[in-house]
Image (spheres, coloured by chain):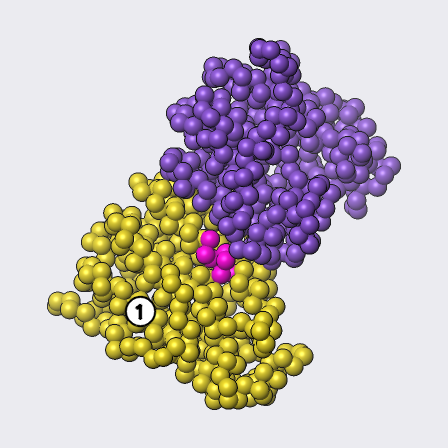
Chain colours: A purple, B yellow
Amino acid sequence: MTPAVPATAPGTAAGTTAPPAGAGPRTGTAPPDAPSILRRCRDLTAPALTDAIDGLHPWVAEMARYTLGLRETDGAPAGPGRGKGIRQALAVLGAEAVSGAGAAGVPGAVAVELVHTFSLLHDDIMDGDALRRGRPALWKAYGTGPAVLAGDALFALGVETLAVTPHAGAAVRQLTTALGDLVDGQADDLLFAQRPWTGPEAVRAGEYVTMAERKTGALLGCALALGARLAGAPDRTAGQLDLVGRHLGVAFQIADDVLGIWGEPERTGKPVHGDLRQGKKTLPVLVALDAARGSAELAELLTAPGALDGDRARRAATLVERAGGRTRAEHEARRHLAEAWTRLTALRLAPGPVDELGTLLSALAERTV
Amino acid sequence: MTPAVPATAPGTAAGTTAPPAGAGPRTGTAPPDAPSILRRCRDLTAPALTDAIDGLHPWVAEMARYTLGLRETDGAPAGPGRGKGIRQALAVLGAEAVSGAGAAGVPGAVAVELVHTFSLLHDDIMDGDALRRGRPALWKAYGTGPAVLAGDALFALGVETLAVTPHAGAAVRQLTTALGDLVDGQADDLLFAQRPWTGPEAVRAGEYVTMAERKTGALLGCALALGARLAGAPDRTAGQLDLVGRHLGVAFQIADDVLGIWGEPERTGKPVHGDLRQGKKTLPVLVALDAARGSAELAELLTAPGALDGDRARRAATLVERAGGRTRAEHEARRHLAEAWTRLTALRLAPGPVDELGTLLSALAERTV
């Protein structure tokens, strides 16, 4: 993927080519909304995912079920803590978009779900995040060593799931490319934390977007492309779908950053101004620091020793907003969403699945699911 | 692999079919010894391994070079800390044994070396081992999070190395089978530590051998089989070579256990009776506890609270030896080595490489390299 244009680029056609919110030309019944699309794909994938987990070492399987939100530590069925299954839905819809059966995409759906779970497990260790989906992260519940092991097991299982498909070589290559990007993105993210807020070593908006594309976009793109590949799509289509997912990932990550500062705690499950308090280098803040006005006081707040407390975090949020950090970040997110949609529709794939993808893309970029 | 016969099985042909110590029918020059075989294969693999590492994220590449003993943390060239390169040698010799060029096995050699390094990185975290080859383990030198990430990167790179070979599907399947076993073996090993020394929940010798086959043998077998596969060998040959490596792995692991109790500290780099002090459940001790005589006092020593100090560790070592733990473990190691050699020669592969494999097998099982 060509490095994305930084957020300070001139305005684009954002908004004019945004995907329809479930307004596809489907006959008879109302088009499905995002939650029903996710549910259908999750139901289609569940048996194969369960089978895969069941084949693991019993102890590792127990940890995998806990992480996937299928079981609590004591083995009791779990309600919360279950992921939305975005990646598995993209794999199923990727297969359907190239006129394949959704079932053809299921090995891809299982693989990306396992790899996503592996990356959450290991990222939580690296980032020291003690909570995941409102429950203790696996490393908190079982210990760091076992959580490292469970991640490794899910990683290996994800690769194995693809290695036994008829398109094994191409499918595994698609996944390993995403894995390489995932690692690079996580490495950049960890290194960003050590870099200063200002000066020549400061993180630039363009670097941030590249990191987000790798850390979040690569696996979303891989999911779409894998589904299509497993349904027999040629390299070119898979490559374009990969880009669709990568742009979606950037939009998704920026939306997450906006929520991380201005989101309602009831909705995000995190404290207000949480990302500012933690000193996370997110796009709105980086863009605000780049802008001329208002950045001096903001830089002073951010670089002062100690964590940002309530009042100072509120002031920083105001300064970021005043310097245009929020507006420009939201614009950049819309631009990536529009780019994803433009690339997707240019492929002229099966209209029904493409409409469902449009519904999903919008919901994800707006974080309404 | 059929579960190995426990150490208490009746005597086998051990010793009578042991591989020759470099006594192959090569013409003119003296047959190469194990260090020269390892050196030749390492030299053949080094450029591709270096290229692979160079393609990683710069920070991750730095950690990989440190772990592989190619560089110190400050980037200076490193002398010690370098692995022997056993697995890469097996991959190269696997290709040569089926009359391929050693170079054909190089992608397999790179892949297994990367995967082996990944497993060392993560195992050191899980086991809390602060030292690796006489230097701080990566998690001690760079932190746990970065070490988890570096392991993930090497894992992904190992899979990718195979995914771009002409035999991608079969090669990746061979690797993922080994990876699954590696995880299972490590899970069992971690769980063994929590089980009692005596009673119905005690670890049995047979369970130990299965664990060793997975944790140590699977990747050795994979190395041999991958080399052969990449040189065009059929499934059956690859499958048999996999078993050769698995038996070698058990022999190698047991030899390691014997050294871990009775090895000279100058040779092992570990304190005398180290494994006993740490309470590790190794085959000599498990076998001794199984035996009728002498086990009561031994069990008492092992189950007493606190670590075994010098005198008590020495007494425990004497009791293990007196109960036949050492002799039987050594017998079991020889039996697996002989089985590896019998299976290897039954394949009637290229005599020169098979002789070199014989030299290597003996040296590894005797831990003279």
Residue depicted at 70% across the width and 41% down the height: A79
Magenta span covers which residues? Answer: B180-186
Overall secondary structure of the magenta section: helix
For disc 1, the chain is: B
Give the quadrant of the N terminus of chain B.
bottom left
> Image quadrant for the C terminus of chain B?
bottom left
Amino acid type at mark 1: Glu
> Which residue carries the number 1 mark?
B339
Q: Residue at x 47, y 14 (%)?
A: A348
Residue at image coords 34%, 75%: B334
Residue B183 belongs to magenta span:
yes
* Picture quadrant of residue A143: bottom right
Estimate the x, y position of residue B147 in percent, counting from the top left.
56, 53
* A345 relative to B359, above or below: above
Residue A324 x %, y %? 74, 22
Residue A231 makes an appearance in the image:
yes
- Is A230 on the left-hand or right-hand side of A31? left
Residue in the foreground of this view, choosing between B365 and A334: B365
The image shows residue A312, relative to residue A288, as above or below, that is below
* Residue that extends furthest to the right in the rendered view of this protein: A311
- In this view, the residue in front, B301 or A315, is B301
